[in-house]
Image (cartoon, coloured by chain):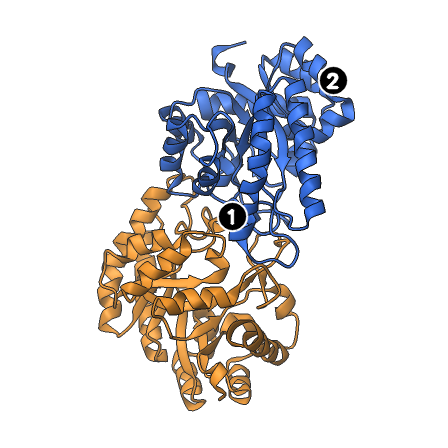
Chain colours: A orange, B blue
């Protein structure tokens, strides 16, 4: 593995067309040391089987994505979400990753109350953070871009994520810093410093911002270097805040998914060298 | 005109399928006292002719949309933008409105520097604000939703808009408060208070937030009541900040544009009564 890839991690969703064995094989061949995994493909392949696969390949699992979806009001729905998040914590422990990424969930049907939805997230964290701690897993609250505030994630800024995280010990609850979601926010660099000072940067993820956005705005994350974000600048912010952990590339992009996954992973490695570490 | 419509204004874009005479006639028939106008249809009909039309109909022109697009780097492009904004100021004066709404512009081609782009806006304002003042026109910086930060408007929050506006006297430069763009922002209520205390709320606009967003995310603004925004709550924030001026409904929505414009305007009046003043 070359030094400039030492911190590189490929999120499984970026090349979801690859099976877990294909992903592991391609990582080894390209010198990629880390992978971020998603629950759905992991469960399809088997949690134990995936754990063995990546362990045998010598790969580090940098994160498991994702838990969360804590904003329901109905007691049964809340109980189901908590049970599912306990399973996610157990899966993270089995896979050998220390970080479970959480996406909070959007507004429940008929509700217009963002503040109350955010408060329900805190209630869920209070139940889950000690459970995760007991499994050696840290929770990373991921603020998503404000364009997802109604239907996916009521936590829209790093400041909001930290306001939630800081109610808990740093080794239990921190934040996910993802350039795609925060690049527009002039307060984000100061919030990265706030997060870093407390040891709450639990993962750092990259995607570039490209337009026009596709319908539904889910699958238009740009390949590194294709968009408006100065990725090197954001790497500088997290490093100035003391974070020197894995840098995970997480792209949801129909164009990339339509191509050969091995080729996309090789391209992503090159883009990382050119636009991030080079 | 009924009391609950006293502050209502319809932005011309909401019913752009109506010609200016059809718009004026429909406003009079429905008891709508105010209109927000756009430069392109106004210039097509003629600035003087539009001014006479709305004056004869007894309508108040609450805003002219829009100037701006100040972020170019090339000197010729910057000079052209300033010249065009002087014309917009003159048109606003001719139309008898006190408020010109400004959309700042996105990143210039190849640039990734949001901070520098925002600073160029301040340079342009320094040239235009006194000119507008001389014409009895106030400039309203409109923060657009962060999903437009790269290609349309590098000013993404009320806080950023106020940071720019406060470099100038309040009667020269203020902000546009539009629910569609700021509803997700937990800091926005405090920023509305900041704006109101200084007399810098120069217009208040409504649109609802609906999903899924359409491709390009431009023309998916929701009819009042169809989405996630508690419009009455935001009206309360601007009123608590001392703003009791016009409330303009500005919807860009392909579905509404495909319908009969008179019917859409009548529906919008009813929605305003039900979800805003009722």
**Residue B48: assigned label:** 2
The answer to which quarter of the image holds residue B10 is top right
Other residues around mark 1 within 10 Å, as few (<14) / some (14–19) / many (≥20): many
Residue drawn at (44%, 40%) of the image = B163
Using the numbered discs, state the Cα–Cα distance from disc 2 to disc 1 in whole angstroms: 36 Å
Q: Identify the residue position indicated by label 1 in the image.
A: B146
Tag in front: 2 or 1: 2
Query: Residue A128 appears at what percent x and percent y?
Result: 26, 62
Element under label 2? Answer: helix
Query: Residue B171 appears at what percent x and percent y?
Result: 49, 25
Q: How many marks?
A: 2
Decide which of A93, A11 is in the foreground and name it.
A11
In this rendering, is residue A119 above or below A127? above
Other residues around mark 2 within 10 Å, as few (<14) / some (14–19) / many (≥20): few
Residue drawn at (64%, 49%) of the image = B216
In this rendering, is residue A105 above or below B159? below
Query: Residue B184 appears at what percent x and percent y?
Result: 43, 43
Query: Residue B77 appears at what percent x and percent y?
Result: 70, 45
A257 left or right, relative to B22: left
A168 left or right, relative to A47: left
Q: Would you say residue B137 is visible in this rendering? A: no
């Amino acid at each position: 593995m070359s030094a400039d890839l030492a911190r590189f991690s490929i999120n499984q969703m970026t090349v979801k067309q690859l099976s877990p064995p294909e992903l592991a094989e391609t990582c080894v061949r390209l010198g990629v040391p880390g992978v971020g995994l998603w629950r759905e493909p992991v469960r399809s392949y088997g949690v134990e089987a995936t754990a063995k696969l990546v362990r045998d390949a010598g790969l580090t699992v940098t994160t498991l994505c994702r838990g969360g979806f804590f904003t329901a009001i109905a007691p049964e729905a809340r109980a189901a979400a908590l049970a599912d998040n306990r399973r996610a914590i157990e899966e993270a422990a089995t896979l050998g990753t220390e970080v479970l990424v959480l996406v909070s969930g959007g507004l429940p049907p008929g509700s217009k109350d963002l503040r109350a939805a955010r408060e329900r997230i805190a209630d869920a964290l209070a139940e889950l953070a000690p459970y995760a701690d007991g499994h050696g897993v840290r929770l990373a609250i991921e603020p998503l871009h404000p364009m997802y505030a109604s239907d996916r994630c009521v936590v829209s800024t790093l400041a909001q994520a930290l306001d939630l995280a800081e109610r808990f010990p740093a080794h239990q609850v921190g934040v996910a810093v993802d350039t795609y979601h925060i690049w527009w926010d002039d307060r984000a660099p100061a919030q990265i410093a706030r997060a870093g000072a407390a040891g709450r940067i639990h993962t750092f993820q990259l995607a570039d911002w490209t337009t026009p956005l596709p319908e539904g705005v889910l699958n238009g994350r740009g390949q590194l270097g294709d968009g408006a974000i100065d990725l090197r600048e954001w790497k500088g912010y997290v490093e100035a805040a003391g974070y020197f952990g894995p840098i995970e590339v997480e792209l949801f992009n129909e164009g990339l998914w339509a191509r050969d996954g091995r080729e996309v992973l090789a391209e992503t490695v090159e883009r990382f060298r050119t636009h991030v570490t080079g």
